[in-house]
Amino acid sequence: MKLLHLTTSILAAGLLIGCGQAESAVEKAAETTKAATSQATEKAKSAVAATKPSAPGVDISAAPSGSYIAESTHAYIAFSYSHQGYSNPILRWKKFDGKLELDSANPENSSLMVTIPSDAIDSGVPSFDEHLVSADFFDAASHPVITFRSTEMKQLYTGTGKVTGDLTIKGVTKPITLDVKLNKVGKHFRNGKDMFGISATGNLKRSEYGVDKYAPMADDVKLMIEVEFQKVD
């Protein structure tokens, strides 16, 4: 009887161990399957994301082709720089003219021209403005106009894109590329004119345009642009 009891105990213990091992194997297999499924799901998501525009915004083709001008009460060109690491002042141009010839069916064929009076700079500090328009910086007396003329437009169908053009400051012309986001296409809520709005950013070194007083301090300049364009009748 004792031998039978011992044998039964051994068998029971073996059975329990076997069951435990089996359960462990099942759990491990489940975890492996879960991990594989999660990995496959992430890969599938990445594959789907890759087929979509990087920033699916508004399609420029929704705006009718024609001439558009920057609407002066909702048009801003500002720039910022590091002031010895203490702060990042933001200055703007009080006025400028912008005209876009839009080919909405083939937006890469569109063109943009921007003209900025050099003496229209606004730092919020009148004495600083006087210094900025002097020969030390923009030399507005000798170079009264800053211009930007586009040479290439890309990726505008997705709502984002790049606009490259020639920027001329103090008689120096160099290419610059702006990252542009098309915010909205529609009609003005009062006058009913076709319009669209954009946000854009860019970077430059002021010393490359002869605006080099105190450089290399504050040489890196960040451009920030917000403009609403309205169609010309």
Image (tube, rainbow, N blue to C red):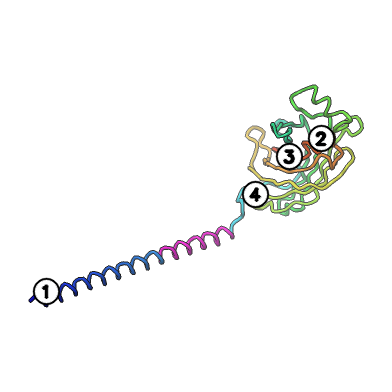
| Residue 5, label in figure | 1
* Amino acid type shown at disc 2: Ile
Q: Nearer the viewer, mark 2 or mark 3?
A: 3
Label placed on residue 223: 3
| Nearest-to-viewer mark from 4 and 1 | 1
Dot 4 alpha-carbon crowd within 10 angstroms: few under 14, some 14 to 19, many 20 or more: many
> Gap in Å between the C-alphas at discs 1 and 3?
88 Å
- Tell me, for residue 116, which label it has, or none: 2
Rendering coords of residue 164 (x, y %)? 77, 49
Against 67, residue 73 (above or below) is above
Q: Which range of residues does the magenta coloring cover?
A: 33-50
Q: Secondary structure at mark 2?
A: strand
The location of residue 142, given as percent across then percent down, is 92, 32
Which residue position is annotated with label 4? 159
Amino acid identity at mark 4: Gly
Please name whichever residue, 127 or 140, is drawn nearer the observer in this view of the structure.
Answer: 127
Quarter occupied by the C terminus = top right
Please say whether residue 41 is one of the residues in the magenta stretch. Answer: yes
Real-space CA distance between mark 4 and mark 3, rounded to the nearest whole angstrom: 20 Å
Dot 4 or dot 1: first in sequence order is 1
Mark 4–mark 3 CB contact (< 8 Å): no
